[in-house]
Amino acid sequence: MRNFYKHKILSVTVSFLYLFPVFSQNRLDSIQHLPDVTITAKTFKEVIPSQKLSGKELEKLNSQSVADALRYFSGVQLKDYGGVGGIKTVNIRSMGSQHVGVFYDGIQISNAQNGQVDLGMFSLDNIEEISLYNGQKSEIFQPAKDFASGGAIYLRSRKPRFTEGKTTHLKATLKAGSFDVINPSLLFEYKISPQINTSFSAEWLNASGKYKFRYRRVNPAGEIAYDTTATRQNGDINATRLEAGLFGTIKDGTWQARFYNYNSERGIPGAIVNNVWRRGERIWDTNSFMQGTVQKEFTHRYKSMLNVKYAFYRTHYVNNDDKLIQVDNLYKQKEIYLSSANVYTILPQWDVSVSYDFQWNELRSDMRDFVYPTRYTHLLAAATSYTWGPLKVLGSCLGSFVKDRIREIESPKPKRIVSPSAYLSVKPFSRPELYIRAFYKKSFRMPTFNDLYYADMGNSKLNPENATQYDIGITYSKNWDDGFFRTFSIQTDGYYNSIKNKIIAYPKGQQFRWTILNLGKVDINGIDISAQTTCSPINRLFITLKGQYTYQKAIDVTDPSDNYYRDQIPYIPWHSGSAVLQAAYRGWYANYSFIYVGERYNQQENIRYNYTQPWYTSDISLIKEFHLKFGTLKAAIEVNNLLSQDYDVILNYPMPKRNYKFTLSIEI
């Protein structure tokens, strides 16, 4: 692992492709003050709170990509490979992207081929809430898959809403900006009957992806090897997203169904190495799924939920670069998912649940010597929660059974793993709003199909990852009805994660392909701190300041004889943080955001040659809302990377300098 570009190529990614974003140039730069929202629920529902962006706060965001919003949550690392179509991978507390479960309307978006989810496929125009959980979602009425992840991201799509006396709602948005970006979208909602609503959402994105950057490299002797200005090439994208949903109510229950389709053609800009600016890689994705949920309360004690899903992902990958291996491959992935969750109330303060999930995955390809893997996954979870005054406790146990079948060679032995977890929260005083919480969790991740079986590149000897998490935290919050200060909240968590047989992926030249290895054992110690306050100096003026800081020490402790023993693992900074300052007054919104990522290393050995310097960016935006007779009109202008910084999040993947975006939307 001494040389970043001499590793073997790993894998060809299927449709959810290691997180290509829709807008890598966008930044989150508006956090808005929300009016109070009253939520009625049993007090034990969530033992450990989540980080959330929802409602009006999320609507004000000028970022297109869900991944851009996530960078403002504490404990999150985002790897950004630059360009409009560049890869973005989300990592929670250094555990790796495959330990992050991504759920869309309560059903997990999975990818058995590479374990990655492209968050850029999901537009903020149709997302009502983003939630991030460390460990698992700490409630018991949920599918077994929800108990499986080391961290979870929940995306909740917008449900139809209508003003009194209306049966339709329409929202049209047009975004345009640097890199020849044009991005119209449309949301239409219709009330079929008092019990059934429907929605349709469509979006088109087109961009050349070209932007100027400075390329400067110094050799180990300290001499300048390259110092020039060039234009990023092969970063174009042409993508469409179509979604349709049905939402209904039944006696003592609800149901919903959703159809999703995403099509894209894009270039893969690749790494800038040895003064080479152009790459010949292109990829075509077709991602479709249908899913449905039915939830019903049969008695005041017993409630049940059924989830079903069918997904089909198609990827066509071509590499015509004459300096690399010529590739033209087609990949098809299918998935069937069934889940049943049941909860029973023994006492008003004591609930128990049982959930069972089955998932079938199949991967096909026209590659030579492909083994056509099929995976059968059975998950069984049992959980209980109890509330005793200020004390809330939750315990769960997940059993995982995974069996792979492959052609022509002996199939590996099935894996059987038991993963327990325990959550606790206590409110020691009635006032102020102070909570102390802790959790313990074990989780298990199978290597992906690409990890194990990719022809000539896969490592069939990879061991599954086993993770153990410990966390203790404290939360304090206070609200005022009037006066200068309106809200204040702060939360701090200290945590320790231990991962055995940790799998690490590195890009090698071709961004579409990776090389993978087991690091053995990694110890992760960290602290997350986040705080937010809102004040009102004068009537109708609200100023919000939000900040977060993360410290992480993630070290390889596999073998004392290794040169990199107890070194920080690649691309994990010791220090990172963000700050947002927002002012709202009479329909005007001004926002400033700042992101900082500290020093880190791009290889296992923490030596000068592998050192990657810190980077930071500043973004600003101005938004105006106009309330007209026929609806609401919103106009926005953004300036991202205000100081036009030259920086790489990942070595040799330069990020855009100063860039602009304009947004115009109308709701009727």
Image (cartoon, rainbow, N blue to C red):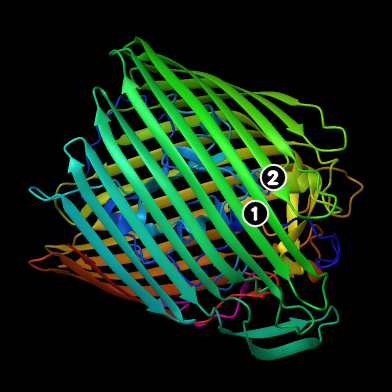
SS class of the residue under badge 1? loop
Residue at image coords 92%, 47%: 561
358 sits left or right of 405 in the view: left
Image x and y of residue 411, in percent: 82, 32
Pointer 1 residue:
14
Q: Which sits in the foreground, 545 or 236?
A: 236
Name the amino acid, label 1.
Val
SS class of the residue under badge 2? strand
Name the amino acid, label 2.
Leu
166 sits left or right of 485 in the view: left
667 sits left or right of 463 in the view: left
Above or below — where is 377 with respect to 6? above
Alpha carbon distance from label 1 to label 2? 9 Å
Give the residues in magenta: 638-649
Q: Residues within 10 Å of mark 2 (few under 14, many from 20)?
A: many
Which residue of the protein is positioned furthest toward the bottom in this rendering?
A: 228
- Callout 1–callout 2 Cβ contact below 8 Å: yes
Above or below — where is 323 with respect to 164? below
Image x and y of residue 534, in percent: 27, 56
Q: Is residue 638 visible?
A: no
Q: Is residue 160 visible?
A: yes
Q: Residues within 10 Å of mark 1 (few under 14, many from 20)?
A: many
Residue at image coords 54%, 33%: 337
Is residue 118 magenta-colored? no
Which sits earlier in the primary sequence, circle 1 or circle 2?
Answer: 1
Above or below — where is 296 with respect to 88? above
Residue at image coords 74%, 65%: 328
Is residue 647 magenta-colored? yes
Pointer 2 residue:
363
Image x and y of residue 380, in percent: 58, 21
Which residue of the protein is positioned furthest toward the right in this rendering?
A: 561
Image x and y of residue 279, in percent: 71, 77
